[in-house]
Image: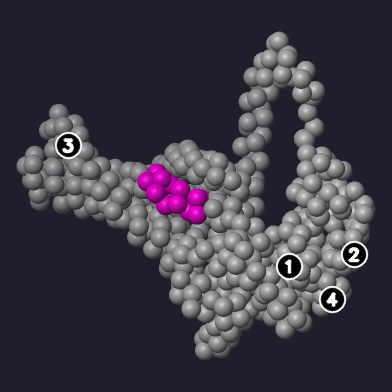
């Protein structure tokens, strides 16, 4: 039992080490990728634009739930006007980056991992190597950069739509005063809150994109292997995002 | 040269020489490491001991950049073609040119169309890989392999799963390209009769060693058991039909279920 635990800890540490080395390999290729912006634009479209609908819908519903729950809670203290502040802070600092990252892992991360895994299984990566083209530079780096760019943008859109959803429920349905809703939000949400959200979504963007391309690139070249890599992408991303979320939150509270 | 995977010896004391400007065929039963041999020649894996020399360069001494430089002088046709599925046929053939050269678009277009014409698929330039048959995909991959004008062209099982017409087309292309472009071709294949019709020399591998070599005619008349079994397609011989297993009747009659209990 203890030996098993020790082994699995060892394996995890080894994977973190492998992933860090892989990140360095990708970073070394970033300048070359930036010289061909079209490849990156394509990937921002693939990971970002194609995740837009799911992000916007989820943002709307999360915001509406926040509006309902927040209103119910704040009414007990007679401070319904603070709903705008509560929703905005909750979304910008926490729910926006975290839920976006989880959705990103499920929508774009799995697509990235299975795409790269299938390229490995069908010898496309080996063929590139044989044509003297480094697949990390041609395939992995643009996808990684695309994901890193897309995540903060998606998180911002999520938060924006979420605040609109909270407003929809709070102001339109529960009749919280519209002026107080917006002015309190404006007065209480400061730049540091926004900054925290931006840092989080940036870090999650790096983590989720790295996990997806790493798992895809190192997938066993079989149907089961690609399936397992896709599953690992979602599980590892979710746990990593929540763990990093705690670390960054604690860091900003200091 | 010696090569082992996970403690299992694949090649032990293998020695081969492929003649410049000729078509050499490597044949042998499945699992003898023919594909591994190609991976060794192209530097995808490294030999444990011994040396591999390609176009006058020793592979073991090469750093990654040097290996890539050497690979620009080689073309390889993978078993399934390995076309990049997100690019059109035209872009697949143009891929090495776009990656390694700064040629103007007009010249790239000309080069790609010339190579596609050589494999008879200029008309398919706009198609995506998913729209191609197996034979077409392999011909496109062949066009891509020759677009950088390599000196060495390597074919990994180019006939697997092809209908007789496509097989004939690929066979003729192997010979024609080799002679027209002055290439050195190495073809790994099981198809004894087909490959014998185009190869200048044949190596027969078995058990990690070259068991026979010579012209296709010499191999046909070779009387050794291994060659007779392989060329004649016999089920039993030095390469056994049965995978090693416990006694057949003993296993059928085992009361306690034996290995499957």
- Quarter residue A177 falls in: top left
Instruction: Between residue A141 and residue A134, name the one nearer to us.
Output: A134
CA gap, disc 1 and disc 3: 67 Å
Tally the marks: 4
Mark 2 or 1, nearer chain start: 1
CA gap, disc 2 and disc 1: 23 Å
Q: Name the residue under label 3.
A: A68
The magenta stretch spans residue A111? yes
Q: Do labels 4 and 3 share a chain?
A: no
What is the crowding at mark 3: few (fewer than 14 residues within 10 Å), some, or many (at least 20)?
many
Residues at discs 4 and 3 in contact (Cβ within 8 Å):
no
Q: Are marks 1 and 4 on the same chain?
A: yes
Mark 4: which secondary structure? loop
Q: Name the residue under label 2.
A: B218
CA gap, disc 1 and disc 4: 13 Å
Residues at discs 2 and 3 in contact (Cβ within 8 Å):
no
Instruction: Between residue A12 and residue B217, name the one nearer to us.
Output: B217
Q: Mark 4 points at which residue?
A: B20
The magenta stretch spans residue A107? yes
Image quarter in which the C terminus of chain B is found: top right
Report whether residue A23 is seen. no
Q: Label 1 is found on which chain of the structure? A: B
Magenta-highlighted residues? A102-115
Instruction: Between residue B198 and residue A99, name the one nearer to us.
Output: B198
Q: Do labels 1 and 3 share a chain?
A: no
């Amino acid at each position: 039992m203890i030996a098993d635990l020790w082994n699995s800890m060892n394996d995890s540490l080894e994977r973190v080490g492998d992933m860090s080395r892989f990140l360095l390999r990708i970073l070394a290729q970033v300048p070359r990728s930036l010289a061909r912006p079209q490849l990156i634009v394509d990937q921002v479209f693939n990971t970002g634009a194609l995740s837009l609908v799911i992000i916007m819908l989820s943002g709307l519903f999360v915001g509406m739930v926040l509006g309902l729950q927040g209103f119910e809670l704040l009414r007990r203290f007679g401070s319904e006007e603070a709903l705008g502040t509560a929703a905005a802070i909750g979304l910008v600092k926490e729910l926006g980056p975290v839920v976006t990252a989880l959705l990103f892992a499920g929508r774009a991360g799995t697509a990235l991992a299975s795409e790269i895994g299938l390229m490995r299984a069908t010898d496309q990566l080996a063929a590139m190597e044989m044509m003297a083209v480094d697949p990390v530079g041609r395939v992995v780096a643009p996808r990684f950069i695309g994901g890193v760019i897309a995540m903060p943008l998606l998180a911002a859109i999520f938060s924006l739509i979420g605040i609109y959803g909270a407003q929809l429920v709070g102001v339109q349905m529960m009749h919280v005063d519209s002026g107080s809703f917006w002015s309190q939000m404006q007065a209480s949400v400061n730049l540091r809150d926004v900054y925290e959200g931006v840092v989080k979504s940036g870090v999650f963007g790096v983590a989720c994109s790295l996990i997806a391309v790493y798992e895809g690139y190192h997938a066993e070249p079989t149907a089961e292997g690609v399936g397992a890599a896709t599953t690992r992408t979602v599980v590892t991303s979710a746990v990593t995002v929540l763990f990093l979320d705690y670390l960054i939150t604690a860091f900003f509270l200091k | 040269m010696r090569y082992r995977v996970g403690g299992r010896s694949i090649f032990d004391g293998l020695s081969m020489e492929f003649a410049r400007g000729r078509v050499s065929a490597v044949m042998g039963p499945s699992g003898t490491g023919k594909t591994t041999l190609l991976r060794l020649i192209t530097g995808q894996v490294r030999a444990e001991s011994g040396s591999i020399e390609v176009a006058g360069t020793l592979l073991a001494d090469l750093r990654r950049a040097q290996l890539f430089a050497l690979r620009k002088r080689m073309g390889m046709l993978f078993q399934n073609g390995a076309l990049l599925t997100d690019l059109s046929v035209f872009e697949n053939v143009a891929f090495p040119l776009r990656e390694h050269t700064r040629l103007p678009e007009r010249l790239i277009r000309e080069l790609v169309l010339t190579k596609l014409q050589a494999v008879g698929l200029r008309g398919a330039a706009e198609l995506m890989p998913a729209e191609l048959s197996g034979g077409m995909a392999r011909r496109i991959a062949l066009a891509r392999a020759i677009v950088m004008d390599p000196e060495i062209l390597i074919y990994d099982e180019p006939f697997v799963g092809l209908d007789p017409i496509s097989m004939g087309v690929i066979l003729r292309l192997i010979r024609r390209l080799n002679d027209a472009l002055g290439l050195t071709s190495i073809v790994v294949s099981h198809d004894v009769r087909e490959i014998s019709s185009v190869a200048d020399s044949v190596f027969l591998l078995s058990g990690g060693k070259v068991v026979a070599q010579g012209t296709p005619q010499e191999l046909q008349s070779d009387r050794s058991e291994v060659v007779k079994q392989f060329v004649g397609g016999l089920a039993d011989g030095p390469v056994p039909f049965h995978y090693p297993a416990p006694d057949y009747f003993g296993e059928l009659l085992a009361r306690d279920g034996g290995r499957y209990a």
